[in-house]
Amino acid sequence: MTMTPAVTACPAKGDASAPTPDTLAYSLTLPSALTSPTVARALTRTVLTAHGLAALLDPATQAVAELTAAACTFNATAEVYLSLRFREGTLRVIAYDSHPRHTHPRLAEACDARRRAALRLLARVARACEGDWGFGEAREPGGGTRMWATVPYGGGVAYGTHG
């Protein structure tokens, strides 16, 4: 008896190749909770290791934790959003929260000062890696605030080795 393979209108097809640095592209929605920075760090460790970027673990997990913690702190809804991408030799970490930019100049200035203070360690990590960081209005339809950090591969590998 000869068996013929089943024909389906929805064939399963996926990329079976091993992850590489250039295929690192992950997005995650997290609850706005105290545990989310820990979950985000664990995810980052797993993802970077799988994509051959374990040399960036220390600065990347620190950046992810700082951005996620700040997003949860400033968030006005139940969820925050985190994105990890590796492009052109640089890891890009972006976190979004729902806190809108203030229209009143003094409120905006005070809120920005609070956010800069919350991200003080992130600024040091980015600077030590020769990367960059910042925050501003989210361009997405839902609004809120976008915070980000970059970790260039060379600077991230050297992170923590400077006197």
Image (cartoon, rainbow, N blue to C red):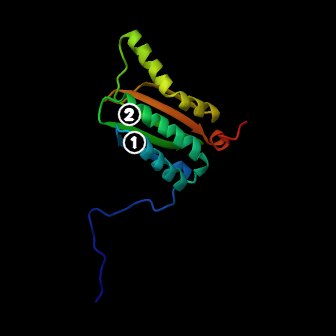
Vertically, is 89 above or below 109? below
Residue shown at 40% from the left, 60% from the top:
14
Q: Quadrant of residue 95?
A: top left
Q: Considering the numbered disc 2 on the image, is that residue within a helix, a strand or a loop?
A: helix
Q: Amino acid at mark 1?
A: Ser
Residue 91: percent from left, percent from top: 55, 41
Q: Which residue is denoted by mark 1 in the rendering?
A: 36
Quarter placement of the C terminus: top right
Residue shown at 45% from the left, 24% from the top:
115
Q: Which residue is denoted by mark 2 in the rendering?
A: 72
Label 1 neighbour load within 10 Å: few <14, some 14-19, many 20+: many
Residue shown at 67% from the left, 42% from the top:
158
Of the residues under marks 2 and 1, which one precedes in the sequence?
Answer: 1
Label 2 neighbour load within 10 Å: few <14, some 14-19, many 20+: many
Q: Considering the numbered disc 1 on the image, is that residue within a helix, a strand or a loop?
A: helix
Q: Quadrant of residue 132?
A: top right
Q: Amino acid at mark 2?
A: Cys
Q: Quadrant of residue 87?
A: top right
Residue 128: percent from left, percent from top: 64, 33
Vertically, is 145 above or below 43? above
| Residues tagged 2 and 1 counted as in contact (Cβ below 8 A) | yes
Vertically, is 99 above or below 162? above
